[in-house]
DNA sequence: ATATTTGCAAATAATTTGCACGTAA
DNA sequence: TTACGTGCAAATTATTTGCAAATAT
Protein backbone atom coordinates (compact mmCIF):
# COMPACT_ATOMS: atom_id res chain seq x y z
CA UNK A 1 0.00 0.00 0.00
CA UNK A 2 1.26 3.41 -0.93
CA UNK A 3 2.71 5.02 2.16
CA UNK A 4 5.62 6.98 0.80
CA UNK A 5 8.59 7.79 2.95
CA UNK A 6 9.63 11.29 3.86
CA UNK A 7 13.37 11.77 3.69
CA UNK A 8 14.98 14.50 5.74
CA UNK A 9 17.32 16.38 3.47
CA UNK A 10 19.47 19.45 3.74
CA UNK A 11 17.26 21.38 1.29
CA UNK A 12 14.10 20.55 3.13
CA UNK A 13 15.50 21.51 6.48
CA UNK A 14 16.66 24.83 5.12
CA UNK A 15 13.38 25.63 3.45
CA UNK A 16 11.43 24.67 6.54
CA UNK A 17 13.69 26.78 8.70
CA UNK A 18 13.28 29.81 6.45
CA UNK A 19 9.51 29.47 6.54
CA UNK A 20 9.62 28.98 10.26
CA UNK A 21 11.79 32.03 10.85
CA UNK A 22 9.83 34.34 8.53
CA UNK A 23 6.21 34.01 9.41
CA UNK A 24 4.93 35.52 6.24
CA UNK A 25 3.99 34.54 2.69
CA UNK A 26 7.06 33.97 0.54
CA UNK A 27 7.29 33.07 -3.12
CA UNK A 28 9.47 30.24 -4.37
CA UNK A 29 11.87 32.78 -5.85
CA UNK A 30 12.15 34.65 -2.55
CA UNK A 31 12.94 31.47 -0.68
CA UNK A 32 15.47 30.57 -3.32
CA UNK A 33 17.15 33.96 -2.96
CA UNK A 34 17.43 33.50 0.80
CA UNK A 35 19.01 30.12 0.32
CA UNK A 36 21.66 31.52 -2.00
CA UNK A 37 22.36 34.39 0.37
CA UNK A 38 22.95 31.81 3.09
CA UNK A 39 25.35 30.09 0.74
CA UNK A 40 23.13 27.09 0.15
CA UNK A 41 23.17 25.71 -3.36
CA UNK A 42 19.61 24.49 -3.95
CA UNK A 43 17.91 24.57 -7.32
CA UNK A 44 14.73 26.49 -7.88
CA UNK A 45 12.94 23.35 -8.98
CA UNK A 46 13.75 21.76 -5.66
CA UNK A 47 12.26 24.75 -3.92
CA UNK A 48 9.08 24.32 -5.93
CA UNK A 49 8.98 20.60 -5.30
CA UNK A 50 9.61 20.99 -1.60
CA UNK A 51 6.89 23.61 -1.25
CA UNK A 52 4.50 21.36 -3.07
CA UNK A 53 5.48 18.52 -0.78
CA UNK A 54 4.88 20.63 2.33
CA UNK A 55 1.56 21.79 0.99
CA UNK A 56 0.48 18.22 0.33
CA UNK A 57 1.38 17.33 3.89
CA UNK A 58 -0.70 20.25 5.08
CA UNK A 59 2.23 21.99 6.73
CA UNK A 60 2.01 25.20 4.77
CA UNK A 61 -0.70 27.41 3.34
CA UNK A 62 -0.49 28.61 -0.25
CA UNK A 63 -2.06 31.66 -1.77
CA UNK A 64 -1.63 33.66 -4.95
CA UNK A 65 -0.53 37.22 -4.28
CA UNK A 66 -2.08 40.17 -6.09
CA UNK A 67 0.10 39.55 -9.13
CA UNK A 68 -0.99 35.92 -9.22
CA UNK A 69 2.37 34.62 -8.03
CA UNK A 70 2.18 31.66 -5.65
CA UNK A 71 3.31 32.33 -2.09
CA UNK A 72 3.66 30.06 0.91
CA UNK A 73 3.60 30.34 4.66
CA UNK A 74 3.93 27.98 7.59
CA UNK A 75 0.50 27.49 9.06
CA UNK A 76 -0.84 24.85 11.38
CA UNK A 77 -4.61 24.63 10.94
CA UNK A 78 -4.52 23.67 7.29
CA UNK A 79 -8.16 24.39 6.78
CA UNK A 80 -8.58 27.89 8.04
CA UNK A 81 -6.56 30.43 6.16
CA UNK A 82 -7.48 33.65 7.88
CA UNK A 83 -4.66 36.11 7.89
CA UNK A 84 -4.00 39.73 8.56
CA UNK A 85 -1.33 40.68 6.05
CA UNK A 86 0.75 43.79 6.62
CA UNK A 87 1.09 46.02 3.58
CA UNK A 88 4.47 47.16 4.82
CA UNK A 89 6.44 44.21 6.17
CA UNK A 90 4.33 41.50 4.56
CA UNK A 91 4.06 39.50 7.72
CA UNK A 92 0.82 37.63 8.21
CA UNK A 93 -0.72 36.92 11.56
CA UNK A 94 -3.40 34.42 12.34
CA UNK A 95 -6.78 35.73 13.24
CA UNK A 96 -9.16 33.99 15.57
CA UNK A 97 -12.48 33.54 13.94
CA UNK A 98 -15.34 32.55 16.16
CA UNK A 99 -17.26 35.56 14.90
CA UNK A 100 -16.29 34.58 11.39
CA UNK A 101 -17.83 31.13 11.67
CA UNK A 102 -20.97 32.62 13.02
CA UNK A 103 -21.15 35.02 10.11
CA UNK A 104 -20.63 32.16 7.67
CA UNK A 105 -23.57 30.42 9.20
CA UNK A 106 -25.86 33.39 8.78
CA UNK A 107 -24.65 33.53 5.18
CA UNK A 108 -26.11 30.12 4.57
CA UNK A 109 -29.43 31.05 6.03
CA UNK A 110 -29.77 34.30 4.17
CA UNK A 111 -28.31 33.28 0.83
CA UNK A 112 -28.98 29.57 0.72
CA UNK A 113 -25.31 28.97 0.12
CA UNK A 114 -23.92 25.68 1.40
CA UNK A 115 -20.45 26.41 2.65
CA UNK A 116 -17.52 24.10 1.92
CA UNK A 117 -14.68 26.45 2.67
CA UNK A 118 -13.88 30.09 3.03
CA UNK A 119 -10.90 32.38 2.92
CA UNK A 120 -10.54 35.71 4.55
CA UNK A 121 -7.71 38.15 4.21
CA UNK A 122 -7.14 41.55 5.68
CA UNK A 123 -4.68 44.01 4.22
CA UNK A 124 -3.29 46.87 6.25
CA UNK A 125 -0.63 47.67 8.80
CA UNK A 126 0.27 45.47 11.68
CA UNK A 127 0.96 46.98 15.08
CA UNK A 128 4.70 47.23 14.66
CA UNK A 129 4.50 48.85 11.21
CA UNK A 130 2.16 51.67 12.04
CA UNK B 1 -4.04 67.55 -19.00
CA UNK B 2 -4.10 63.83 -19.20
CA UNK B 3 -7.72 62.76 -19.49
CA UNK B 4 -7.57 59.89 -21.90
CA UNK B 5 -10.47 59.10 -24.14
CA UNK B 6 -12.41 55.89 -24.04
CA UNK B 7 -13.24 54.61 -27.46
CA UNK B 8 -16.17 52.31 -27.93
CA UNK B 9 -15.00 49.44 -30.07
CA UNK B 10 -16.46 46.18 -31.23
CA UNK B 11 -14.05 44.17 -29.09
CA UNK B 12 -14.82 46.11 -25.96
CA UNK B 13 -18.54 45.86 -26.44
CA UNK B 14 -18.28 42.12 -26.89
CA UNK B 15 -16.08 41.59 -23.88
CA UNK B 16 -18.30 43.77 -21.74
CA UNK B 17 -21.37 41.91 -22.92
CA UNK B 18 -19.85 38.54 -22.12
CA UNK B 19 -18.94 39.67 -18.62
CA UNK B 20 -22.35 41.15 -18.19
CA UNK B 21 -24.13 38.00 -19.33
CA UNK B 22 -22.01 35.60 -17.27
CA UNK B 23 -21.88 36.89 -13.75
CA UNK B 24 -18.91 34.85 -12.68
CA UNK B 25 -15.12 35.00 -12.71
CA UNK B 26 -13.70 34.29 -16.17
CA UNK B 27 -10.10 34.06 -17.28
CA UNK B 28 -8.80 35.91 -20.33
CA UNK B 29 -8.56 32.61 -22.18
CA UNK B 30 -12.18 31.73 -21.36
CA UNK B 31 -13.40 35.06 -22.63
CA UNK B 32 -11.32 34.65 -25.74
CA UNK B 33 -12.83 31.22 -26.36
CA UNK B 34 -16.34 32.64 -26.07
CA UNK B 35 -15.51 35.35 -28.57
CA UNK B 36 -14.29 32.83 -31.11
CA UNK B 37 -17.34 30.65 -30.61
CA UNK B 38 -19.45 33.69 -31.36
CA UNK B 39 -17.44 34.13 -34.54
CA UNK B 40 -15.65 37.25 -33.32
CA UNK B 41 -12.03 37.57 -34.35
CA UNK B 42 -10.35 39.29 -31.40
CA UNK B 43 -6.78 38.63 -30.38
CA UNK B 44 -5.92 37.33 -26.95
CA UNK B 45 -3.73 40.34 -26.29
CA UNK B 46 -6.69 42.60 -26.89
CA UNK B 47 -8.66 40.59 -24.37
CA UNK B 48 -5.89 41.09 -21.83
CA UNK B 49 -5.61 44.77 -22.62
CA UNK B 50 -9.35 45.31 -22.44
CA UNK B 51 -9.61 43.53 -19.11
CA UNK B 52 -6.79 45.64 -17.77
CA UNK B 53 -8.55 48.72 -19.04
CA UNK B 54 -11.80 47.74 -17.36
CA UNK B 55 -10.02 46.97 -14.13
CA UNK B 56 -8.30 50.36 -14.18
CA UNK B 57 -11.69 52.00 -14.64
CA UNK B 58 -12.96 50.02 -11.68
CA UNK B 59 -15.64 48.26 -13.70
CA UNK B 60 -14.48 44.75 -12.98
CA UNK B 61 -12.97 42.85 -10.08
CA UNK B 62 -9.91 40.70 -10.60
CA UNK B 63 -8.78 37.76 -8.56
CA UNK B 64 -6.32 34.92 -9.01
CA UNK B 65 -8.04 31.55 -8.98
CA UNK B 66 -6.62 28.63 -7.01
CA UNK B 67 -4.16 27.87 -9.80
CA UNK B 68 -2.98 31.48 -9.78
CA UNK B 69 -4.62 32.31 -13.09
CA UNK B 70 -6.15 35.78 -13.28
CA UNK B 71 -9.93 35.89 -13.53
CA UNK B 72 -12.34 38.77 -13.93
CA UNK B 73 -15.94 39.56 -13.12
CA UNK B 74 -18.24 42.52 -13.55
CA UNK B 75 -18.69 44.11 -10.18
CA UNK B 76 -20.02 47.50 -9.20
CA UNK B 77 -18.65 48.39 -5.78
CA UNK B 78 -15.02 48.31 -6.78
CA UNK B 79 -13.77 48.22 -3.23
CA UNK B 80 -15.61 45.36 -1.69
CA UNK B 81 -14.91 42.02 -3.24
CA UNK B 82 -17.00 39.68 -1.17
CA UNK B 83 -18.25 36.78 -3.16
CA UNK B 84 -19.83 33.42 -2.66
CA UNK B 85 -18.34 31.26 -5.38
CA UNK B 86 -20.10 28.07 -6.38
CA UNK B 87 -17.80 25.06 -6.67
CA UNK B 88 -20.11 23.62 -9.30
CA UNK B 89 -21.20 26.35 -11.71
CA UNK B 90 -18.53 28.85 -10.77
CA UNK B 91 -20.98 31.69 -10.50
CA UNK B 92 -20.24 34.27 -7.85
CA UNK B 93 -22.88 36.17 -5.96
CA UNK B 94 -22.41 39.31 -3.97
CA UNK B 95 -22.72 39.03 -0.25
CA UNK B 96 -23.96 41.81 1.97
CA UNK B 97 -21.49 42.53 4.67
CA UNK B 98 -22.65 44.70 7.50
CA UNK B 99 -21.64 41.97 9.93
CA UNK B 100 -18.35 41.71 8.10
CA UNK B 101 -17.50 45.36 8.66
CA UNK B 102 -18.32 45.01 12.28
CA UNK B 103 -16.02 42.02 12.57
CA UNK B 104 -13.24 43.92 10.83
CA UNK B 105 -13.59 46.63 13.42
CA UNK B 106 -13.24 44.22 16.32
CA UNK B 107 -10.17 42.83 14.55
CA UNK B 108 -8.51 46.19 14.83
CA UNK B 109 -9.25 46.47 18.51
CA UNK B 110 -8.11 42.98 19.37
CA UNK B 111 -5.10 42.68 17.10
CA UNK B 112 -4.03 46.30 16.70
CA UNK B 113 -4.27 45.87 12.96
CA UNK B 114 -5.09 48.99 10.97
CA UNK B 115 -7.32 47.90 8.15
CA UNK B 116 -6.90 49.20 4.60
CA UNK B 117 -8.81 46.56 2.73
CA UNK B 118 -10.12 43.06 3.06
CA UNK B 119 -11.23 40.23 0.84
CA UNK B 120 -13.60 37.50 1.71
CA UNK B 121 -14.51 34.50 -0.36
CA UNK B 122 -16.77 31.58 0.28
CA UNK B 123 -16.56 28.37 -1.64
CA UNK B 124 -19.43 25.95 -1.78
CA UNK B 125 -22.69 25.35 -3.61
CA UNK B 126 -25.15 28.02 -4.51
CA UNK B 127 -28.86 27.39 -4.10
CA UNK B 128 -29.44 26.24 -7.65
CA UNK B 129 -26.50 23.83 -7.68
CA UNK B 130 -27.31 21.90 -4.56
C1' DA C 1 20.15 -2.06 -1.80
C1' DT C 2 16.49 0.70 -3.03
C1' DA C 3 13.24 4.31 -2.80
C1' DT C 4 13.28 9.14 -2.80
C1' DT C 5 15.21 13.62 -3.84
C1' DT C 6 17.95 16.67 -6.64
C1' DG C 7 20.07 19.40 -10.44
C1' DC C 8 19.99 20.78 -14.90
C1' DA C 9 18.21 21.98 -19.09
C1' DA C 10 14.26 21.94 -21.82
C1' DA C 11 9.16 22.25 -22.09
C1' DT C 12 4.79 24.69 -20.81
C1' DA C 13 1.65 28.21 -19.85
C1' DA C 14 0.16 32.77 -18.72
C1' DT C 15 0.91 37.37 -19.61
C1' DT C 16 3.23 41.46 -21.71
C1' DT C 17 5.29 44.20 -25.25
C1' DG C 18 6.98 46.51 -29.78
C1' DC C 19 5.50 48.05 -33.73
C1' DA C 20 2.98 48.82 -38.02
C1' DC C 21 -1.67 49.23 -39.28
C1' DG C 22 -6.73 50.11 -38.40
C1' DT C 23 -10.40 52.89 -36.49
C1' DA C 24 -13.24 56.09 -33.45
C1' DA C 25 -13.42 60.64 -32.44
C1' DT D 1 -6.53 64.31 -38.57
C1' DT D 2 -4.82 62.31 -34.61
C1' DA D 3 -5.11 59.93 -30.51
C1' DC D 4 -6.34 55.51 -29.27
C1' DG D 5 -7.03 50.44 -30.18
C1' DT D 6 -5.63 46.06 -32.35
C1' DG D 7 -3.22 42.09 -34.42
C1' DC D 8 0.72 39.50 -34.72
C1' DA D 9 4.85 37.57 -33.41
C1' DA D 10 8.45 37.75 -30.18
C1' DA D 11 9.85 38.43 -25.34
C1' DT D 12 9.20 37.65 -20.40
C1' DT D 13 7.98 35.24 -16.30
C1' DA D 14 6.33 31.64 -13.36
C1' DT D 15 6.08 26.88 -13.02
C1' DT D 16 6.64 21.92 -14.41
C1' DT D 17 8.93 17.93 -16.18
C1' DG D 18 12.30 14.13 -17.90
C1' DC D 19 16.13 11.95 -16.80
C1' DA D 20 20.55 10.69 -14.97
C1' DA D 21 23.17 11.31 -10.75
C1' DA D 22 23.19 11.89 -5.63
C1' DT D 23 21.49 10.80 -1.15
C1' DA D 24 18.62 9.04 2.87
C1' DT D 25 16.87 5.05 4.62
Image (tube, coloured by chain):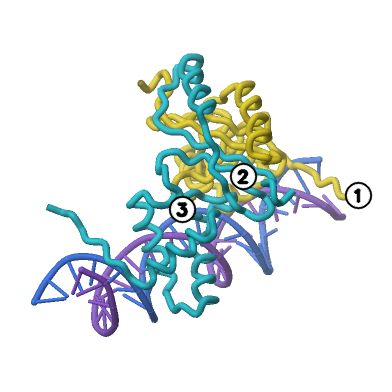
Chain colours: A cyan, B yellow, C blue, D purple
Q: Is residue B39 visible?
A: no
Distance CA(mark 1)–CA(mark 3): 48 Å
Query: Horizontal and vertical percent for residue B118?
Result: 63, 37
Choose mark 1 or mark 3, whichever is in front: 3
Which secondary structure, mark 1?
loop
Do circles 2 and 3 both sit on a common chain?
A: no
Query: Horizontal and vertical percent for residue B123?
Result: 44, 32
Do circles 1 and 2 both sit on a common chain?
A: yes
Subunit under mark 3: A
Instruction: Find out whether the residues at labels 1 and 2 contact each other: C-beta distance under 8 Å.
Output: no
Distance CA(mark 1)–CA(mark 2): 25 Å
Q: Earlier in the sequence, mark 1 or mark 2?
A: 1
Which secondary structure, mark 2?
helix
Q: Is residue B116 above or below residue B85?
A: below
User: Which labelled disc corresponds to residue A48?
Assistant: none
Which secondary structure, mark 3?
strand
User: Which labelled disc corresponds to residue B51?
Assistant: 2
Query: Horizontal and vertical percent for residue C24?
Result: 74, 41
User: Which labelled disc corresponds to residue A74?
Assistant: 3
Q: Which residue does the numbered mark 1 point to in the structure image?
A: B1
Choose mark 2 or mark 3, whichever is in front: 3
Subunit under mark 2: B
Query: Horizontal and vertical percent for residue B9?
Result: 67, 41
Amino acid sequence: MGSRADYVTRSREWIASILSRERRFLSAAEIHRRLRRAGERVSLSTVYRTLDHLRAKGDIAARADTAGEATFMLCEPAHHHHHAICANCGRAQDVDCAAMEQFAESLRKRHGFRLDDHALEFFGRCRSCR
